[in-house]
């Protein structure tokens, strides 16, 4: 029986820089950082309150084929790679705190039917959604 999601992959341009960004800027904790055969490095981070879900900070390369790795690098450079969503209790305050730390936002906090949402980029070009959730139903969305 499957009990939960335990690992997701986030493509990054530099594992050290990404690890520093997620730990020092966003408040994640270090998970694993080991180098395996052929120089392959396995780096994970996790949110301290949710250690059951690790995020692998993966550089595009093997085991991907060269074409796929290059496509991911191009998407990162263009800022078109989606990352994941982060929940906050106060989107406006978290936005201000992160802007003060130099985080680039492509969308400031805005009201949505499901809460307050802002969109930022990590230091690899992935976009991350920051959401202060509220209860909603399908009727809250325009048809």
Image (spheres, rainbow, N blue to C red):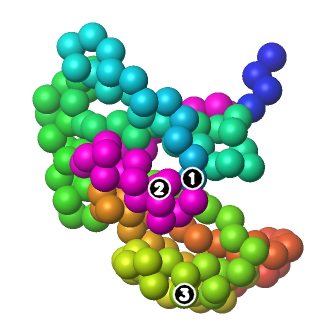
- Mark sitting earlier along the chain (3/2): 2
Which residue is at a point 50% across and 78% down the rendered structure image? 98
Instruction: Identify the image quadrant of the C terminus.
Output: bottom right
Do the residues under discs 1 and 2 have CB atoms within 8 angstroms?
yes
- How far across and down, in percent of the image, does residue 118 sit? 54, 79
Q: Residues within 10 Å of mark 2 (few under 14, many from 20)?
A: some
Nearer to us in this view, 133 or 30: 30
Q: What residue occupies the far top of the structure in this picture?
A: 37
Nearer to us in this view, 67 or 7: 7
Which residue is at a point 85% across and 73% down the rendered structure image? 135
- Mark sitting earlier along the chain (1/2): 2
Residue 82 at least partly seen? no
Quarter location, residue 86: bottom right
> Is residue 65 rendered magenta in the image?
no
The numbered mark at residue 28 is: 1
Q: Which residues are magenta?
A: 5-27
Q: Which residue is mark 2?
A: 22
Which residue is at a point 38% across and 63% down the rendered structure image? 122
124 relative to 3, above or below: below
Residue 3 at least partly seen? yes
Number of numbered discs overlaid on the protein picture = 3
- Mark sitting earlier along the chain (1/3): 1
Q: Is residue 28 left or right of residue 68?
A: right
Helix or strand or loop: what does disc 3 sit on? helix
- How far across and down, in percent of the image, does residue 103 sit? 40, 75
Helix or strand or loop: what does disc 1 sit on? loop
Q: CA distance from mark 3 to mark 2?
A: 17 Å
Helix or strand or loop: what does disc 2 sit on? helix
Q: Which residue is mark 3?
A: 96
Quarter location, residue 113: bottom right
């Amino acid at each position: 029986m499957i009990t939960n999601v335990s690992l997701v992959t986030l493509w990054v341009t530099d594992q050290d820089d990404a690890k520093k960004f997620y730990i020092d800027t966003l408040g994640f904790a270090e998970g694993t950082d080991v180098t395996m055969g052929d120089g392959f490095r396995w780096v994970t981070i996790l949110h301290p309150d949710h250690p059951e879900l690790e995020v692998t900070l993966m550089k595009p390369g093997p085991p991907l084929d060269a074409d796929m790795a290059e496509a991911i690098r191009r998407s990162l450079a263009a800022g078109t790679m989606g990352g994941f969503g982060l929940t906050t209790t106060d989107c406006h305050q978290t936005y201000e705190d992160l802007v003060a730390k130099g985080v680039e936002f492509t969308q400031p906090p805005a009201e949505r039917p499901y809460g307050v949402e802002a969109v930022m980029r990590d230091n690899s070009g992935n976009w991350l959604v920051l959401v202060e959730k509220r209860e909603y139903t399908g009727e809250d969305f325009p048809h």
